Image (cartoon, grey):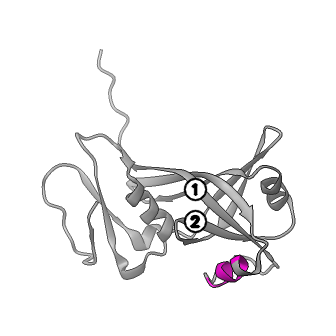
Amino acid sequence: MRTCRDAAFAAPDSGPSVLLPLAIVGSFQNNELMMFEHEDGNPILKLDDEQSWKLIEGTKHGRLVVTVAGDPDIFPVNYAVSGRKLFLRTAPGNKLAELTINSKVLFETDGILSEEAWSVVLRGTARVLDQSADIAEAEALGLKPWVPTLKDFYVEITPSSVSGRHFQFGEHPEREI
């Protein structure tokens, strides 16, 4: 991965690579560009931890998956990152109840452009913050609800694993016979 601040940056002619404008795929700072280099024309690139975290840190929306009694639920959320943990705000309801019953969660965030996309999946443990010092730290992140509703509960997600993929779109290949 290479980053640059010059929007006119051109990749050298050393095989397929993609410049991903971070300002487009999320709310990245400094208008950086992120380059993903695909080997041997493979349209799917497995991202390393650093690449995955850069995308998580630069994007402020995703989906939280919780499961109770074998029934999964998925919720759109906005979030903040601090110390490689995710923080979100919520109100009483299914999301809060379900992650309290089963703290094992999945989180996914992604970005789609005209010719490429990426996805990062985080597995982890959710915890409703109940100590005033923890809540104060979460409040300091400046996380605001998307809609004008009261979201008085902060949730911290501690990851156990993170995996990411970058995809280059293209035509369906012909099958060799």
Q: Which of marks 1 and 2 is nearer the N terminus?
A: 2
Instruction: In this rendered view, identify the residue nearer to me: 124 or 8.
Output: 124
- Residue 82: image x %, image y %? 55, 72
Q: Mark 1 points at which residue?
A: 159
Instruction: In this rendered view, identify the residue nearer to me: 143 or 118.
Output: 143
**Which residue lies at the image location 79% right of the left edge and 37% below the top edge?**
70
| Residue 27 among those drawn in magenta | no
- Residue 92: image x %, image y %? 87, 67
- Residue 145: image x %, image y %? 71, 77
**Which residue lies at the image location 68% right of the left edge and 61% below the top edge?**
76
Q: What element carries label 2?
A: strand
Numbered circle sitting on residue 28: none
Question: Residues at badges 1 and 2 in contact (C-beta under 8 Å)?
Answer: yes
Mark 1 → mark 2, Cα distance in angstroms: 7 Å
Instruction: In this rendered view, identify the residue nearer to me: 57 or 102.
Output: 102
Q: Is residue 137 left or right of residue 92?
A: left
Please identify the quarter of the rendering in which residue 75 is found. Answer: bottom right
* Quadrant for the N terminus in the image: bottom left
Please identify the quarter of the rendering in which residue 144 is found. Answer: bottom right
Amino acid at pointer 2: Lys
Q: Name the residue under label 2.
A: 85
**Which residue lies at the image location 26% right of the left edge and 64% below the top edge?**
2
Q: Give the range drawn in magenta.
A: 134-140
Q: Is residue 13 left or right of residue 117?
A: left
